[in-house]
Amino acid sequence: MKRLCLLSLLATLLLSCSSSDQQPNRVQSPDNTLALAFRLTESGAPQYSVTRDGETVIDWSALGLICAEANLTDSFSVVSYEQSSYDDTWETVWGEERLIRDQHNELVVHLTHASGRHMDIVFRCFNDGFAFRYVFPEQEQTDLTVTNEVTEYRFTADHDAWSIPWRTEYYEGLWTKAPLSQKSDTLCSPITLELTHGGYAFVHEAALTDYPAQNFYMADGALKIYLTPWLHSDVKAYLATPFATPWRMVILTRTLPEMVASRIMLNLNEPCAIDDTSWIRPMKFIGIWWGMHMKTLTWEAGPKHGATTANMERYMRFAKDHHIDAVLAEGWNLGWETWEHFDFTTPYPDWNMDYLSALSNELGVQIIGHNETGGNAADYERDLDTIYRYHAKHGIHAIKTGYVSPIIRTRDGLQWNKGQSGVRHYRKVIETAARYHIAIDNHEPVMPTGLQRTYPNLMTQEGVRGQEWNAWSQDGGSPCDHVTILPFTRVMAGPVDYTPGVFAFENPIMPNTRVHSTLMNQLGLMVCIYSPLQMACDLPENYLKHPEAFAFIERVPCDWERSLLVDGKIGEFCIFARQQRGTDNWFLGGITDEQSREALVPLSFLPEGKTYHLCLWRDGDKADWQTNPYDYVIDQADLTSSDTLRIPMASAGGFAASLTPIAQ
Ligand code: NOJ
């Protein structure tokens, strides 16, 4: 990611404050609406509080770590305060936005502990939230064994929280809403809050690289952090100084569009560590995949084997004809019979890698590889160089990885995937893949925290109850509101490989499961659920049944200049507008829950004075996800920024649209 020299304005104001500064322990957002204060209690315990427009949002809350070597939650004294301001705009390699402004004020509190250790707490205040982290500078006593982090958020009201329980396997759960006080379970990070007095908060972490993922629990009226432990151990993290923990981050906004537009998490991550990013390409893809989940094809070899040379060639030629960049193939390699030892460099006999690699070259259609580890991260990590060299040699520059096993085997034995050891493994994968020019689509990941800024080859991740649940879930498929919750919860943490685009809703093999949506809702998802590797998951033969609807999938890009939430309500509906990167074209997507409703879309985001041609794919008058999911209409019109669209959405319906400037 390039620094934009022109826009770059680094106004660093270093104030070493001891007693002369009036409020050395406070930091405010650049627009002065948010203020964060720090203090030590009488026993030397660090605490912070946050106000917005003068009202306390977070009351004095605990900070610190309990370590085997020292209790770093009290007995501190302040050495000095240091304040600075920062304002810079950087360019993303891909994303919802091309340019991102990082404007914040920073307060560093330098502390010493009775044990002789040094710890800094770095606070940042943005206009749309705040963050802080613990930093251990280089010092004599290097090792720290963290048994607990006591960070808490003492919200001053009992806000409604959207969350999933922390034991939710692979984060593939249904998000539920309840007041914080009623959340009796431990919760995964992130959580999204609807504030009782108006506004929203998104509580998560950023830059998780060598530390356990955080979780939350409510106790003593506060939301507290619970770090994922090493398995069967009291230890949460092994640190060696110098060390910085991930950022604890809260996006705090008045409106939902502002919350969705916040880029704090990316700003808190390190700039791009890859020099040449020209090989990293956002792509739309189809795949030999949905058939396996619908049980018409198999991963393992046999009469219904999906990943055969012939099938792959058919998919690749279809992709070429329909402006799809890439094709994923699962089940191409040995090991699927037992899941005990996957071989990532040996195809099944009915898969001709050399032939398909040459075909990929000839057609200009990428192959997306698939490495399902079955949770054996240790073997995978050991062989990473060999595996990625093999894929790169065959022109494969994107791989979907998989860790189907709630507990994975890392180099440290059996571990939670979101414990420190798992986090280290995923990091190693991203860094190694970058060296071989391979992009990663990580399934069964640790929850994203914005690492894609530093390693933009980490393109998308699962960590969501995705479309596949609608193929086989015992409960019949995700409820209609599920996808209207995700943009405000899981997607806020980073791109999601949700796999939209189902075009055939009947499943004769598992008749009791069902995608709870209309065809137009599936189109809307292509815009509403952001992913720079965006899969259209259905089979070519199903797309050919609705070629005019499929035309939207052919047209919609997955890399954006600008993105905005036009309107939405968590769990009810959302409408997104996005400008295609490097063009003046805009795209719209809208989805609703089981409630049919009219979407109001003012086109005020379009440049004034320009006429645009609208092509709108919307639910037909008789559309209904249960009785008539395929009913749709295509409307066309020439419009300007002063127009407002009124678009009917059926029950679990939606719409999609392209807006193309008319040459004048
Ligand atoms: C679970 C993944 O989410 C899915 O996409 C994949 O097909 C299977 N594992 C097999 O690896």
Image (spheres, rainbow, N blue to C red):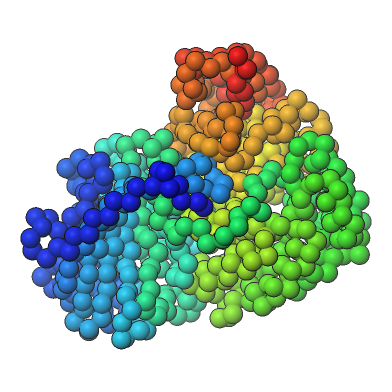
At 37% across and 52% down in the image, what residue appears?
Answer: 203
At 39% across and 41% down in the image, what residue appears?
Answer: 259
Q: Is residue 230 left or right of residue 221?
A: right
State the image coordinates of residue 412 (x, y, percent, origin top left). Answer: 56, 81
Asked whether the viewer can see residue 433, the reply is yes
Tell me which corner region of the image, top left, top right, bottom left or bottom right, holds residue 12: bottom left
At 71% across and 67% down in the image, what residue appears?
Answer: 388
At 75% across and 25% down in the image, what residue appears?
Answer: 548
Q: Is residue 513 left or right of residue 88?
A: right
State the image coordinates of residue 359 (x, y, percent, origin top left). Answer: 87, 51
Tell me which corner region of the image, top left, top right, bottom left or bottom right, holds residue 347: bottom right
The one nearer the camera, 102 or 197, is 102
State the image coordinates of residue 313 (x, y, percent, origin top left). Answer: 88, 48
Q: Where's the C terminus, which quadrant? A: top right
Asked whether the viewer can see residue 591, the reply is no
Q: Is residue 109 left or right of residue 434?
A: left
The one nearer the camera, 573 or 37, is 37
Q: Is residue 585 above or below residue 87?
A: above
